[in-house]
Image: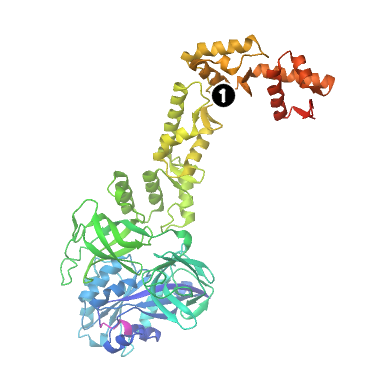
Amino acid sequence: MNAQPFIVATAGHVDHGKSALVKALTGTDPDRLPEEKARGITIDLGFAHLELPSAAHRASATLHLGIVDVPGHEDFVKNMVAGVGSVDLALFVVAADDGWMPQTEEHLQILTSLGVGRAVVALTKIDLAENEALVQAQLRDKLADSPFAQAPIVPTSVVSGRGLEELKVTLAQVLSDTPPPRDIGKPRLPVDRVFTLRGIGTVVTGTLTGGGLRRGQAVVIHPSGKTVRIRTLQNHNRDVEVCGPGMRTALNLPDVEDSASAAGVQRGDVITLPETGAPSPAMDVLLEKSARLTGGKTGGARPLRDGSLVRIHVGSANVPARVFFLETGQLCAGGSALAELRFKFPVFAFASDRFIVRDWSEQATLAGGIILDPDACSKRFRTEAQRQLLDRRASSPKDAAAFVQTLLARDGAVPRPGLLLKSRFSANEISEIASHLAAEGKAVVAGGMIADAAWWAALRQTASAAIDADHRAHSERAGLPLNGLRTMIEARISAPELFNALVADLCQNGFAQEGVAIRRTTHRPALPPHLQAAGAKVRAALAARPLEPPSRKELAPDAPTQQALRFLLQTGEAIELGDGVVLTSDDFDRATERVKEFLRQHGPATASELRQALGTSRRIVIPLLERLDKDGVTRREADRRSLRK
């Protein structure tokens, strides 16, 4: 039988019967703390498990519901937010005798801001309602203009048992039409509970999203960055080898303390894989303040002002931060604005993650939002390039292509393996988009990098112009030194491998690398006009006595002839044998052939015999023969030389 995991979170005002309803549905009392028992209210998160048969068209599947019971009291809303970060369905609880209350509304705002789009409403304590139809009508009116406007309402009573089975059927019907949690190969476990068991060690729990974890796997704890290994995994108190997305997961991490120290782990930390990136001290976001926040005693209706110190709830974390708006000075009810969150300590989150903004005193929910750039830079925040990136992503927060294109448009080029690593898009999705953009001519794949096509063309044009300028200014050189080209464009390239990719691209499009220089394939080194006379003088001196040329000092006694001679040597028109002896390449080749011919006819010969055969002096023949030995043409044995086979 196919098991499909889903997470259901309760929501609603204090004392409306959330915990009692969970116990009636599952047989598990989610209130586990002694103080909760004494006070009769939920203070911290509680957890339970419920299995339901799926709807008729998927009858072979069993729905495994992890139920998170959250506090309803206003003093513990911060704990409530920690439990609803990864929810497939909200079990919205409203008591028939009280009706809609302040925390009912606040919980609705939180669920809406977190993107929870499915809910079942349990109208509890229905046996206390004086007019059931009126209560339901009032409740439907309160749900209007919210994601839960059409949510089914099920009257229930834990005293009489009324509606409990109907509620289970309704939950199954709604969840059977809910897509299963996505596996994008990027598992994250926001830690919502930590405890230690004697003989076992530290255990952390949370709702796994984005991918699977397995026993024995190495994981990292963010934000500390500590790497540990999973000893065992559990799902609803059962040992398992692997947990997948959407499952309530318990990890035994034996090498970690359950403390807030640097070596420990606590609620708000994230367990993930080492290759999924690092925490960030700032994030650029879209903030939204509900139009429903127009009154109330909690202060949620007041504007959120620029520079405010707030608490950001993302995943299971509660992080102090300051809010800085891109344009506006404040955010009022019904509005939205681009902003940057600057955290007190680094936070690990992905692009497209949703979060809640509450005031510093934890008395009011001020806004919700979505992360657009999880690795923001304060210096870049107000640039036009960043503004364009944020505007496009804000209008298409689920469009992977928009995220890829905006990143390329801003940065020009990025390493392909790390493209949108901290995002809710899978590696396959990102790779397909990159390939599609390349096929359309909107992007260029260069080595391990991917670049915006227009940006790459401009970079290539800059490099081409620099090489051409060097050819005009220094026609005597083989080409522009690569180090010089790198210096000219280093401010525009983000990674060393990008320069190598650029050189490779140029060499496929009309350029060639010559040692440590690069040139156009049509470029032929030539002496500049002011050195042509000196070059002619050097050539004439070498040609006048081919195998008895003047010494280098005599050949180039001044700066112009020295520059001309250096050009001839660099271009290979002349060869320096050593000891100041310079021959033209043609004369060297002819001398080499004469030596080879003499040795073929006469066998091994001394330097003196070869000198006489060439008609030159010892000053010339000794460095010539040493060069031929080095080149592998001849082999010296005692005072004789022979041809190498």
The answer to whether residue 508 is visible is no
For the stretch drawn in magenta, what is the main secondary structure?
Answer: loop
Q: Position of residue 221 (x, y in %)?
A: 43, 67
Query: Please, is residue 194 above or below residue 634 in the view?
Result: below
Q: Is residue 40 left or right of residue 244?
A: left
Amino acid carrying label 1: it is: Gln
Question: In the picture, residue 343 is in which quadrant?
Answer: bottom left
Looking at the picture, how far across and down is residue 486, in whole percent?
Answer: 45, 36
**Closer to the camera in the image, 323 or 242:** 323
**Secondary structure beneath label 1:** helix
Q: Position of residue 289 (x, y in %)?
A: 23, 62
- Tell me, yes or no, whether the highlighted magenta stretch contains residue 16: yes
Q: Is residue 342 magenta?
A: no
> Where, quadrant-wise, is the C terminus in this rendering?
top right
Q: Note whether residue 44 is visible.
A: yes
Q: Which residue in the structure is indicated by mark 1?
A: 570
Q: Quadrant of residue 33?
A: bottom left
Residue at horizontal 54 percent and vertical 70 percent from the top: 216
Report the number of discs.
Answer: 1
Q: Residue at x 29, y 44 (%)?
A: 384
Residue depicted at x 26% and y 70%:
108
Residue 303, image x, y percentages: 17, 61
Is residue 159 shown left or right of residue 461?
A: left
Q: Which residues are magenta?
A: 15-19
- Relative to 399, say whether 594 is above or below: above
Front residue of 423/333: it is: 423
